[in-house]
Amino acid sequence: MKPSLVLALTLATFAAGAAESVVPSLEIAGSISEPGKLTIQELQALGPVTRPWKEHGKTHQVTGVPIQKILAARGFSPGPEGKNVPVTEKRAGWRKVLVAVAADGYQAAFSCAELSDEIGATKVLVVWSVDGKPLRTETGPLRLVSPSDHEPSRSVFKLERLVLVDVTQ
């Protein structure tokens, strides 16, 4: 085979592979009105924050978006409250559970009530940067962290999906 033909085939194969490359995204699924995917750029447009986060005795600065903003962008609502609201409908959203799923299958769960600023103190971020640098390949491109947790066991490397589960069904 001529060297120019080999080079052309190699470049064509590389170009086809590059065209098929996947843009990193986060899937939001389950019991939510607007399931779908958000790219890192779409997550960044939701209003990033930088917060201190302790992991294994070291304090880091993580940059990401609060989970409440992601859920709200996909139509999550805690639901109505009040004396005239039927018990089955009263704050139905707070009776859901959010399950964060990693590429390797690891999962962490949070009640939607604990994630609410109105009820809980749990703070959760989907982050793309630690200490001003993009996440390393082995932990990113997205990671879930909970700066309010006292240990990092609900931190999720290589976060791929957030699933809202209605536990009342």
Image (cartoon, rainbow, N blue to C red):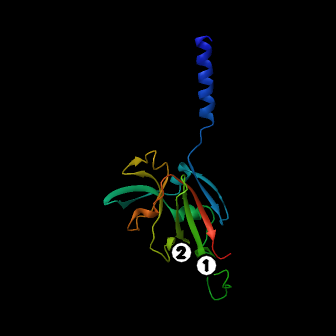
Residue drawn at 47 percent across, 61 percent down: 125
Q: Is residue 156 above or below residue 15?
A: below
Q: Quadrant of the N terminus?
A: top right
Q: Position of residue 17 (x, y in %)?
A: 61, 32
User: Do callouts 1 and 2 mark residues in contact (Cβ within 8 Å)?
Assistant: yes
CA gap between label 1 and label 2 equals 9 Å
What secondary structure is marked by label 2?
Answer: helix
- How dense is the environment of label 1, judged by Cα within 10 Å: few (below 14), some, or many (20 and up)? some
Q: Amino acid at mark 1?
A: Arg
Query: From the viewer's perspective, is 103 left or right of 127?
Result: right
Location of residue 73 in the rendering, given as x and y in whole percent from the top left corner: 59, 61
Q: According to the image, label 2 marks what residue?
A: 113
Disc on res. 91:
1
Left or right of 105? Residue 137 is left
Locate residue 159 relative to residue 55 in the image: left or right.
right
Quarter occupied by residue 23? top right
Going from N to C along the chain, the mark reached first, 1 or 2, is 1
**What is the x, y in percent for residue 136?**
43, 46
